[in-house]
Image (tube, rainbow, N blue to C red):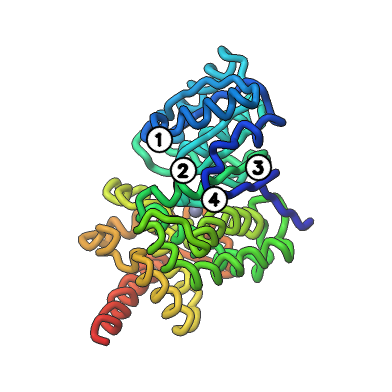
Amino acid sequence: MAQAFASPGKYIQGYNELARIGKHAASFGSSALVLCSRARLHDLQDIIADSFKNAGIQAVFEPFGGECTKQEVERLRSLVKNHQSDLIVGLGGGKAIDTAKAVAYHEKTPVVIVPTVASCDAPTSSVVIFYNEDGAFQEALLTRRNPNLVLVDTRIIANAPVRLLVAGMGDALATYFEARTCVQAHRRNLAGGTFTLASYALAELCYRTLLSDGLPAVLAVQSKVVTKALDNVIEANTLLSGIGFESNGVATAHAIYDGFTVIPGARRMYHGEWVAFGTVVQLVLENRPRQELDEVLGFCRSVGLPTTLKDLGMENIGRDQLLQVAQAATAPKESIHNEPFPVTPDDVVAAILVADALGREYRGTVDKD
Ligand SMILES: [Zn+2]
């Protein structure tokens, strides 16, 4: 199997960088459809409109419907046709970003992605996750084309709720551990081949960056300021995690998230919060050393990521529901099968219960100190 590495065409990260979006996007098109999450449209529209005007780019602004569904993609495709847009710009969190990527893929236009939160690693990748209207995971679309430009304005991220940055660290936490599993088992990545030295090095750097800069970055966002530690964590959550998962592969941690989306109450938690817990589940399933589990649990505790079912609002989940989660997590197409051994629903239930117990035990030990 060939090696394959996927990345966005260009990645730009800076303070107040959104004000220069026109200059950065001018080479990709002259008539943009700007898809923006409803919450951010009001305060960001003028900044973008001014910058586009100076760069000679026409812009139509459209609020995002709220869920990345096939219906929403079709609705936006007809707008692209009506306005004869030759460029898609997607602003917002993971779902708005994925929707913009899907529209650009179908309409064969370039796409510029502006994450307004660092809550997941969707911005850089070619992967689109579709959900049902009610928010349950439906399927992943591998577009095989990455965004032409990812533009991150650190001022915007620093002013977003801290829980979203922390959720992004949860998503980024899984990157190295899932990469290691896929690399050691010679699994296919999401870029259509096997890992490269570059992709694996970025996954390792992603984890090291979280350990060293995670807590200082949380403190920066709590004060709504940008520090070097926050710069580093934004890069880890967005660029390192994005390339790291796409160009190495995913395994159990993400399958656990997919599994829990079948429980309606689980959707109150963010993707990255589930993936952080899923990382511990994966380490239990792989029977990794206690020292490694303690390092991961310690990190989660330091930044405020959930480590128990209670933290995830699932303290009352019954065995039947857990089995439902495990069955969804072990569906034939799930990434859990990238593990180098067969995984059954019973194995998953066991690993979830032990991960939860370890989280509770770790908390008890730390709180006593
Ligand atoms: Zn993820």
**How far separated are the C-alphas under marks 2 and 3?**
18 Å
Label 3 element class: loop
Q: In this view, does 232 lie above or below 269?
A: below
Q: Quadrant of residue 312?
A: bottom left
Residue type indicated by callout 1: Arg
From the image, tell me which residue sits under label 3: 146
Give the image location of residue 31, x and y in percent.
Answer: 62, 20
Residue type indicated by callout 3: Asn
**How far separated are the C-alphas under marks 4 and 3?**
22 Å
Nearer the N terminus, badge 2 or badge 3? 2
Q: Is residue 257 left or right of residue 76?
A: left
Residue type indicated by callout 4: Lys
Return the residue nearer the eye: 138 or 47.
Answer: 47
Residue type indicated by callout 2: Thr
Q: Is mark 4 within 8 Å of ligand 1?
A: no
Q: Is residue 163 above or below residue 28?
A: below
**How far separated are the C-alphas under marks 3 and 1?**
24 Å
From the image, tell me which residue sits under label 1: 40
In percent of the image, x 66 and y 22: which residue is there?
30
Q: Residue furthest top?
A: 82
